[in-house]
Image (spheres, rainbow, N blue to C red):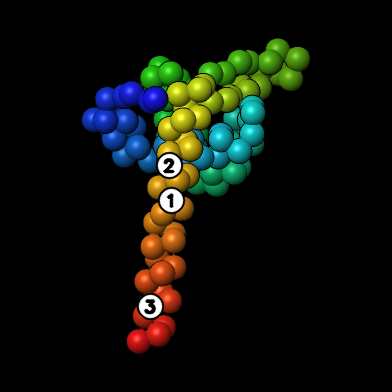
Amino acid sequence: MLFFNMRKIGSWLERTHTKAILIELSKKDKTYLTELREAIGKGSSSTIDNVLMDLYFNGLIEEEIEDKFGGRRNIWLTQKGKQIAQKLIEIDEIIKKDQHEKEISEEKN
């Protein structure tokens, strides 16, 4: 079972792009920083770097720098990060389903 401080998690999620970054990282085992930035498609480099630093220091991601490719950063979710990303995906699915049901209901009326 996943135990965590809800206030701390809530403050992470309030940061710009945190949810999108976690969900994007959950799609692959490892992702290069440049690929992550392209997939997110928004936000300055410093904003994304700050979110990644926060996620790293809170144990949600790991990273390595590959010397053979000119210092490219390879990033992946830790087990804790995977669990949180999965919960975020589940929440998004519930919201989308609810929105879809409301649209269908409105069409019938």
Q: Label 2: how many residues lie within 10 Å, few (<14), some (14-19) or many (20+)?
A: some
In the picture, the disc for residue 92 is 1
Q: Label 3: how many residues lie within 10 Å, few (<14), some (14-19) or many (20+)?
A: few
Q: Nearer the viewer, mark 2 or mark 3?
A: 3
Residue shown at 51% from the left, 40% from the top: 23
Farthest residue in the front direction? 1
Q: Position of residue 83 (x, y in %)?
A: 46, 30
Find residue 2 and report its image quarter: top left
Residue type marked 3: Ser
Residue shown at 37% from the left, 80% from the top: 106
Farthest residue in the bottom direction? 109
Inter-mark Cα distance, 2 to 3: 26 Å
List the residue tagged with mark 2. 88
Farthest residue in the right direction? 68
Residue type marked 2: Leu
- Toward the viewer: 59 or 99? 99
Find residue 57 and report its image quarter: top left
Farthest residue in the left direction? 7
Q: Quadrant of the C terminus?
A: bottom left
- Toward the viewer: 73 or 109? 109
Inter-mark Cα distance, 3 to 1: 20 Å
Residue shown at 59% from the left, 43% from the top: 39
